[in-house]
Every structure is written in C-alpha cells, then in structure tokens.
Image: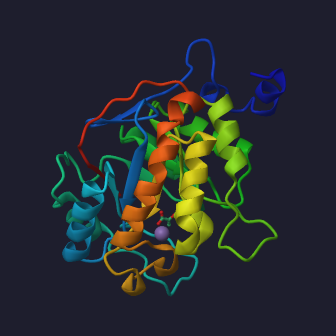
Amino acid sequence: MRQSWHERFCDSPDVLKSARCDQTVVPVLDAEIGGRDFITMAGPCSVETEFQLMATANHVRRAGARILRGGAFKPRSSPYAFQGHGLAGLQMLARCDVPMVAEYADILQIGTRNMENYTLLEAAARSGKPILLKRGMAATIADFLRSAQVILDNGNPNVILCERGIRTFETAMRNTFDVAAIVLLKQISHLPVIADPSHAAGCRELVPALARIAVAAGADGLLIEVHPNPEKAWSDADQTLNFTEFDDMMASLDPYIALRPQISPREMVSADVMEAVG
Ligand code: PEP
Ligand code: MN
C-alpha cells in the first residue's frame, strides 16, 4: 500500500491492511462477510408488520439473499416521517423464520446519521455483535475509518463498512454513490466493504445498475431495500424494489459475481442460511 495512505489515515491504523491482517472475515452464524461468498442482505427499510416482514424474508431468501435487513430504530431526515417500531420491530425480526436469534439481531447497523456518535459506537462495539457501519452522508473516508477504529478500539473486530452515498452538489439523486470509495477501501482496509445502492440512488430504477457497479468495484456484498408493495412502504418507498424487481436484479448480478475471483482471488463456498440484521 502507498505510504501516503498510511499517512493520510494515520488516525485509524488498525483498520488498514498490514502484514498481520490482509482481510477480516466477519462471521454471522453460517455466513461469512468479507470471505469467499458475495453476500446480499435484503429486506424492508422499516419493519412494519409481521406479514410484510415474513413475506419479504421468504422471498429474498429464495432469491439468494443470505441476510434479512429491517430497521426498528430509525432516526429520519424528517421528524414527521415514520421513525420505526423500536423494540416491537426487533421482536418481529426475532420471530422470523430464520435460523438464529440468540438476541434480536445478529448484526447491528449504525446508520449514516450516527456514524460519528462515538458513545453509540462504543456501546454497540461492547455488545460483541458484528457492526454494519454506514458511512456518514457528509463523512470523508478518513472520518469513516476513524469511526471504524473506535469500534475496534472497544474490543470488537467485526466491523463491516457500508458505502451508502454521500451529499454532493448533485441533487438529481438522493445521494451520490461514491464507487471510488469502495475501490479505495478494498485496497487500503482489511474490513469487509458492502454497498447500499438503495440509499445512494433514492430511486428504484437505478438500484440494479448501481448494484452491478458495486460488484465490479470489488464490494463484498450488498444491502438492498425490498418490500412486497413498495408504493405502500412506510419509509423509503421510492427506492424500494418489489419482489420481481429484486429477482431481476439478482439474476443480472450473476455474471458480475462470477468474475469476482478475478477481481479479488477467492474460492467460492456456499451455504443457505439467512440471518437477521436490525
Ligand atoms: C436504512 O438503512 O434504512 C437507513 C436509514 O440508512 P442510512 O442510515 O444509510 O440512511
Ligand atoms: Mn431506508
């Protein structure tokens, strides 16, 4: 790695690749994030009802997703938007037909608005659960890596970095998908990197193409919003895929995923277990 990267990211030395660590693989029950498999996490933006969650879980699992996502505590841009069911949402996730749930979720997601909430990061780290850390919408890559370092410093090595788009002068899309960040993070950090094209795009028509770009950029996985009836979703309706759109996207990813060993040489393994993320 270039010496200048070491200098630029000197506040987060433990997240950078080193002779000691070239790649962290985050185990989540039977899945491995950052390992040989490309991992798709999919589900609704917010947990709404048991029907919505069960229907989505069953569908995305059949289509190849390995991890179910669903938000329960959701700080939103608008104080008048649905903020999530809180504990009740987590309890719905735990009742899903997935092989797991010692507690309520197997991965804790830190949203973009909380990336620099160090008190929260410390508490999340101490839970011992894998942490899916989303890039702050106005965070530089150095800021992002510093937050990951805080989690590592608190004794939790299982951090998954998530590029979800950043704010730029461009307003046509909800965010600007920083695909170069994925490429750079994969070169300099040993932590797994996943992409969230749903929040990056803000509109469902762009999600499949951005997902394919993320695979080509070397991402270890995807986070995709899916709902049985996106028009009726209580949050992020515009960017959410319906089941058919999700199936089509997954099929379109296959040739890109098949090229991954050339992008970053890894053997392929398989397992069909789904876990929950909340
Ligand atoms: C989400 O994943 O639903 C979410 C709110 O994401 P972000 O924090 O990236 O906006
Ligand atoms: Mn969302």
Measured along the vertical axis of the image, is residue 174 above or below residue 231?
A: above
Residue drawn at 50 percent across, 40 percent down: 220
Relative side of 169 to 106, left or right = right
Q: Where is residue 73 in the image (x, y as percent from the top left)?
A: 40, 67
Measured along the vertical axis of the image, is residue 129 above or below residue 209?
A: above
Residue drawn at 32 percent across, 71 percent down: 47
Relative side of 10 to 126, left or right = right
209 or 118: nearer the eye? 209
* Extreme-front residue of the structure: 255
Q: Position of residue 278 (x, y in %)?
A: 35, 58
* Extreme-top residue of the structure: 19
Relative side of 137 to 118, left or right = right
Measured along the vertical axis of the image, is residue 258 above or below residue 166?
A: above
Viewport quadrant of the N terminus: top right
19 or 116: nearer the eye? 19
Relative side of 176 to 150, left or right = right
Q: Where is residue 173 in the image (x, y as percent from the top left)?
A: 68, 73
Q: In which quarter of the image is residue 19?
A: top right
Note whether residue 146 is visible: no
Colouring rule applied to residues? rainbow
Q: Quadrant of residue 161?
A: top right
Residue drawn at 24 percent across, 42 percent down: 272
